[in-house]
Each structure stands twice: as structure tokens, then as C-alpha cells.
Amino acid sequence: MGGRRAVTTVDARGLRCPAPVIRLARAAADAPPGTELTVLATDPAAVHDVPAWARMRGHEMVGATEQDGVHSLTVRTHP
């Protein structure tokens, strides 16, 4: 596969806290180490909640952007 990482999108647009993190946790439970999970969320709390969840679970935040009120937060899973 030439080093390509698996990427999964977790669409949590329109959902309020804690739903974006719950959906992320479910996706991470099924993901092999090294998978990048991108959460799309409109709830501003996700900007704080997703990085905090990643830190507590030993995963890595690899990026965060916002466009037109949609936050895109990417986490790389670790074992």
C-alpha cells in the first residue's frame, strides 16, 4: 500500500456534546492503529472535547480546521 493510512470520516454535524466524541470513540474502537479519524462537527464544544478525548486515550491530534461553521478535527489512533 505504499505507506498510505486508512482515513475514516465521522460525521457529527448537527449533533451536540457529547455525541461527536461518542461517535469518535465508537469509530476508534473498530479502527486499527494508525487510522486517521476525521470528525466533522458543528458544535463548538468539539474543538475542546475531541483533543481532550484523544489525549486521555493516548491518540494523536493531527489537525483541526474550521470552514463555514464546520469543524474538521483529525485524530490518529494508537494502540
Image: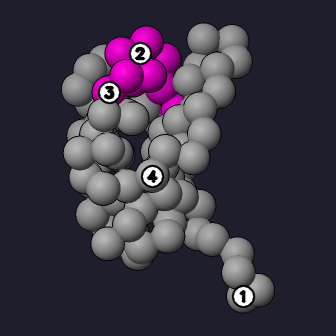
Q: Is residue 68 left or right of residue 51?
A: right
Q: CA distance from mark 4 to mark 3?
A: 14 Å
Which is nearer the N-term, disc 1 or disc 4? 1
User: Which residue in the rendered view is the most extreme toward the bottom?
Assistant: 1
Which is nearer the N-term, disc 4 or disc 2? 2
Provide residue 32's location: percent of width, then percent of height.
40, 75
Q: Which residue is mark 3?
A: 49
Looking at the image, residue 19 lies above or below residue 9: above
Q: What residue is rendered at 27% in x and 30% in y?
A: 19
The mark found on residue 77 in the picture is: none
Which is nearer the N-term, disc 4 or disc 3? 3
- Residue mark closest to the camera, 4 vs 3: 4
Region rendered in magenta: 40-49
- Residue mark closest to the camera, 3 vs 1: 3
Q: Is residue 45 located in the magenta-colored stretch of the structure?
A: yes
The mark found on residue 60 in the picture is: 4
- Image-quadrant location for residue 1: bottom right
Looking at the image, residue 68 lies above or below residue 17: above
Q: CA distance from mark 3 to mark 1?
A: 33 Å
CB atoms at circles 3 and 2 under 8 Å apart?
Answer: no
| Kind of residue at badge 2 | Asp
Within 10 Å of the Cα at label 1, are there few (<14), some (14-19), or many (20+) other Cα atoms?
few
Label 1 sits on a secondary structure element that is loop
Q: CA distance from mark 1 to mark 2?
A: 35 Å
Label 3 sits on a secondary structure element that is helix
Q: Which residue is mark 2?
A: 43
Provide residue 77's location: percent of width, then percent of height.
41, 62
For this rendering, which residue is in front, 79 or 26?
Answer: 79
